[in-house]
Image (cartoon, rainbow, N blue to C red):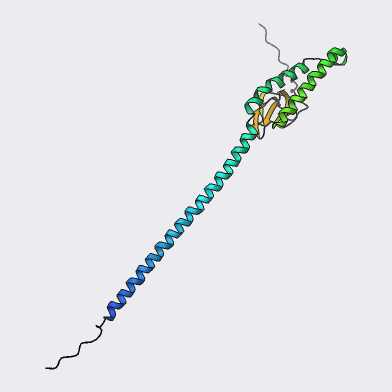
Amino acid sequence: MTQKPAKDEPEIDTATSEELANEVASNAEADLARLESERDDFKDKLLRTLADMENLRRRTEREISDAKAYAVTSFARDMLASADNLRRALESVPEAARSGAEAALAALIEGVELTERDLLKTLERHGVRKIDPQGEKFDPNLHQAMFEAPDAETPKGMVSKVVQSGYKIGERVLRPALVGVSAGAPKPQEPSTPDTSGSTPSGH
Protein backbone atom coordinates (compact mmCIF):
# COMPACT_ATOMS: atom_id res chain seq x y z
CA MET A 1 0.00 0.00 0.00
CA THR A 2 1.06 3.44 -0.69
CA GLN A 3 0.57 6.14 1.99
CA LYS A 4 -0.45 9.70 1.25
CA PRO A 5 2.31 12.10 2.13
CA ALA A 6 1.56 14.21 5.20
CA LYS A 7 0.71 17.83 4.52
CA ASP A 8 3.08 20.46 5.88
CA GLU A 9 0.33 22.64 7.41
CA PRO A 10 -3.04 21.62 8.79
CA GLU A 11 -6.07 22.99 7.03
CA ILE A 12 -7.83 25.89 8.84
CA ASP A 13 -11.57 26.09 8.73
CA THR A 14 -12.53 29.39 7.09
CA ALA A 15 -15.61 29.83 9.29
CA THR A 16 -13.55 29.34 12.46
CA SER A 17 -11.02 31.88 11.26
CA GLU A 18 -13.70 34.49 10.67
CA GLU A 19 -15.18 33.84 14.10
CA LEU A 20 -11.79 34.36 15.72
CA ALA A 21 -11.26 37.55 13.76
CA ASN A 22 -14.68 38.85 14.73
CA GLU A 23 -14.06 38.00 18.39
CA VAL A 24 -10.72 39.77 18.37
CA ALA A 25 -12.30 42.83 16.72
CA SER A 26 -15.18 42.78 19.19
CA ASN A 27 -12.80 42.58 22.14
CA ALA A 28 -10.73 45.41 20.70
CA GLU A 29 -13.81 47.59 20.29
CA ALA A 30 -14.92 46.81 23.85
CA ASP A 31 -11.47 47.66 25.17
CA LEU A 32 -11.43 50.89 23.16
CA ALA A 33 -14.89 51.85 24.43
CA ARG A 34 -13.82 51.11 28.01
CA LEU A 35 -10.66 53.19 27.63
CA GLU A 36 -12.61 56.07 26.09
CA SER A 37 -15.13 55.89 28.96
CA GLU A 38 -12.33 55.95 31.52
CA ARG A 39 -10.69 58.84 29.68
CA ASP A 40 -13.94 60.83 29.67
CA ASP A 41 -14.48 60.03 33.35
CA PHE A 42 -10.98 61.21 34.28
CA LYS A 43 -11.44 64.34 32.15
CA ASP A 44 -14.75 65.11 33.87
CA LYS A 45 -13.21 64.61 37.30
CA LEU A 46 -10.27 66.85 36.36
CA LEU A 47 -12.56 69.63 35.14
CA ARG A 48 -14.69 69.37 38.28
CA THR A 49 -11.59 69.52 40.46
CA LEU A 50 -10.30 72.58 38.59
CA ALA A 51 -13.72 74.26 38.94
CA ASP A 52 -13.81 73.46 42.67
CA MET A 53 -10.31 74.87 43.12
CA GLU A 54 -11.29 78.06 41.27
CA ASN A 55 -14.43 78.44 43.40
CA LEU A 56 -12.38 77.86 46.54
CA ARG A 57 -9.87 80.49 45.45
CA ARG A 58 -12.60 83.05 44.79
CA ARG A 59 -14.38 82.24 48.04
CA THR A 60 -11.14 82.55 49.98
CA GLU A 61 -10.36 85.90 48.36
CA ARG A 62 -13.89 87.12 49.18
CA GLU A 63 -13.60 85.95 52.79
CA ILE A 64 -10.22 87.67 53.15
CA SER A 65 -11.67 90.86 51.65
CA ASP A 66 -14.70 90.69 53.97
CA ALA A 67 -12.47 90.05 56.97
CA LYS A 68 -10.46 93.18 56.15
CA ALA A 69 -13.57 95.27 55.48
CA TYR A 70 -15.62 94.15 58.47
CA ALA A 71 -12.92 93.44 61.06
CA VAL A 72 -13.80 96.67 62.91
CA THR A 73 -17.55 96.02 62.95
CA SER A 74 -17.83 95.43 66.70
CA PHE A 75 -15.54 98.35 67.53
CA ALA A 76 -17.35 100.66 65.11
CA ARG A 77 -20.74 99.69 66.56
CA ASP A 78 -19.46 100.59 70.04
CA MET A 79 -18.22 103.96 68.78
CA LEU A 80 -21.67 104.91 67.48
CA ALA A 81 -22.79 105.70 71.02
CA SER A 82 -20.04 108.33 71.27
CA ALA A 83 -21.08 109.83 67.93
CA ASP A 84 -24.71 109.93 69.12
CA ASN A 85 -23.75 111.65 72.37
CA LEU A 86 -21.75 114.32 70.54
CA ARG A 87 -24.69 114.98 68.21
CA ARG A 88 -27.15 115.20 71.15
CA ALA A 89 -24.82 117.63 72.92
CA LEU A 90 -24.78 119.91 69.89
CA GLU A 91 -28.53 119.69 69.33
CA SER A 92 -29.21 120.53 72.99
CA VAL A 93 -27.81 124.03 72.49
CA PRO A 94 -30.56 126.34 71.14
CA GLU A 95 -29.72 128.35 68.04
CA ALA A 96 -30.34 131.60 69.92
CA ALA A 97 -27.82 130.60 72.57
CA ARG A 98 -25.25 129.80 69.88
CA SER A 99 -25.56 133.17 68.19
CA GLY A 100 -25.22 135.08 71.45
CA ALA A 101 -22.82 132.72 73.18
CA GLU A 102 -19.85 134.03 75.09
CA ALA A 103 -16.37 133.20 73.88
CA ALA A 104 -15.95 130.28 76.27
CA LEU A 105 -19.25 128.65 75.30
CA ALA A 106 -18.63 129.27 71.59
CA ALA A 107 -15.21 127.63 71.87
CA LEU A 108 -16.77 124.65 73.65
CA ILE A 109 -19.42 124.24 70.95
CA GLU A 110 -16.76 124.53 68.24
CA GLY A 111 -14.64 121.92 70.01
CA VAL A 112 -17.54 119.47 70.21
CA GLU A 113 -18.31 120.01 66.51
CA LEU A 114 -14.66 119.43 65.62
CA THR A 115 -14.58 116.26 67.71
CA GLU A 116 -17.71 114.96 65.97
CA ARG A 117 -16.26 115.68 62.51
CA ASP A 118 -12.98 113.96 63.37
CA LEU A 119 -14.82 110.92 64.72
CA LEU A 120 -16.94 110.62 61.58
CA LYS A 121 -13.85 111.00 59.36
CA THR A 122 -12.05 108.31 61.34
CA LEU A 123 -15.01 105.97 60.94
CA GLU A 124 -15.12 106.72 57.20
CA ARG A 125 -11.45 105.79 56.85
CA HIS A 126 -12.40 102.36 58.17
CA GLY A 127 -15.35 102.00 55.79
CA VAL A 128 -18.10 103.27 58.12
CA ARG A 129 -20.44 105.82 56.52
CA LYS A 130 -23.27 107.80 58.07
CA ILE A 131 -26.83 107.33 56.77
CA ASP A 132 -28.81 110.58 56.87
CA PRO A 133 -31.88 109.89 54.70
CA GLN A 134 -33.82 113.12 55.23
CA GLY A 135 -36.09 113.61 52.20
CA GLU A 136 -35.18 110.23 50.66
CA LYS A 137 -37.56 107.41 49.81
CA PHE A 138 -38.11 105.04 52.75
CA ASP A 139 -36.01 101.89 52.33
CA PRO A 140 -36.69 99.10 54.86
CA ASN A 141 -33.19 97.75 54.18
CA LEU A 142 -31.59 100.96 55.46
CA HIS A 143 -34.26 102.60 57.61
CA GLN A 144 -36.45 101.65 60.53
CA ALA A 145 -39.78 103.47 60.61
CA MET A 146 -40.68 104.84 64.04
CA PHE A 147 -43.91 106.51 62.98
CA GLU A 148 -45.94 107.66 60.00
CA ALA A 149 -47.56 111.07 59.99
CA PRO A 150 -49.18 113.45 57.48
CA ASP A 151 -46.76 116.01 56.04
CA ALA A 152 -47.89 118.57 53.49
CA GLU A 153 -44.29 119.35 52.43
CA THR A 154 -43.05 115.77 52.02
CA PRO A 155 -44.51 113.27 49.51
CA LYS A 156 -45.99 110.04 50.80
CA GLY A 157 -43.46 107.30 51.48
CA MET A 158 -40.54 109.70 51.90
CA VAL A 159 -38.54 110.20 55.09
CA SER A 160 -39.92 113.30 56.78
CA LYS A 161 -37.82 113.18 59.96
CA VAL A 162 -34.59 111.47 61.03
CA VAL A 163 -34.86 110.49 64.67
CA GLN A 164 -31.43 108.85 64.76
CA SER A 165 -28.84 108.61 61.99
CA GLY A 166 -27.89 105.19 60.69
CA TYR A 167 -24.52 103.79 59.62
CA LYS A 168 -23.20 101.38 56.99
CA ILE A 169 -19.93 99.48 56.98
CA GLY A 170 -18.95 98.46 53.49
CA GLU A 171 -22.15 97.21 51.89
CA ARG A 172 -23.70 96.10 55.17
CA VAL A 173 -25.98 98.06 57.48
CA LEU A 174 -24.23 98.62 60.78
CA ARG A 175 -27.28 100.34 62.26
CA PRO A 176 -30.49 101.36 60.44
CA ALA A 177 -31.56 104.98 60.60
CA LEU A 178 -34.59 105.58 62.83
CA VAL A 179 -36.99 107.70 60.81
CA GLY A 180 -40.47 109.11 60.55
CA VAL A 181 -42.25 108.49 57.25
CA SER A 182 -44.60 110.93 55.55
CA ALA A 183 -48.16 109.82 54.95
CA GLY A 184 -48.58 112.66 52.45
CA ALA A 185 -50.60 115.82 52.74
CA PRO A 186 -53.48 115.61 55.22
CA LYS A 187 -56.85 115.05 53.62
CA PRO A 188 -59.07 118.13 53.63
CA GLN A 189 -62.00 117.80 55.99
CA GLU A 190 -65.36 117.68 54.28
CA PRO A 191 -67.62 120.57 55.37
CA SER A 192 -70.52 119.43 57.45
CA THR A 193 -73.88 119.79 55.63
CA PRO A 194 -76.54 121.65 57.62
CA ASP A 195 -79.86 119.93 58.29
CA THR A 196 -82.32 121.45 55.79
CA SER A 197 -85.17 119.06 56.39
CA GLY A 198 -87.01 121.72 58.42
CA SER A 199 -88.21 119.16 60.92
CA THR A 200 -88.50 120.19 64.55
CA PRO A 201 -88.53 117.95 67.55
CA SER A 202 -92.02 116.95 68.50
CA GLY A 203 -93.23 118.12 71.91
CA HIS A 204 -95.86 116.62 74.13
Q: Quadrant of the N terminus?
A: bottom left
- Asked if one can make out residue 80 in the rendered structure from this viewpoint, the answer is yes
- Counting from the top left corner in percent of width and height, residue 139 is at 67, 32
Q: Residue at x 46, y 59 (%)?
A: 40
Whether residue 83 sits left or right of residue 27 in the image: it is right
Res. 102 image quadrant: top right
- Counting from the top left corner in percent of width and height, residue 163 is at 71, 22
- Counting from the top left corner in percent of width and height, residue 124 is at 72, 30
Q: Residue at x 65, y 22 (%)?
A: 78
Whether residue 162 sits left or right of residue 110 in the image: it is left
Res. 165 image quadrant: top right
- Asked if one can make out residue 184 in the rendered structure from this viewpoint, the answer is no
Res. 147 image quadrant: top right
Q: Residue at x 53, y 47 (%)?
A: 53
Relative vertical location of residue 123 with respect to residue 51 in this rendering, above or below: above
User: Which one is nearer the viewer's eye here, 104 or 144?
Assistant: 104
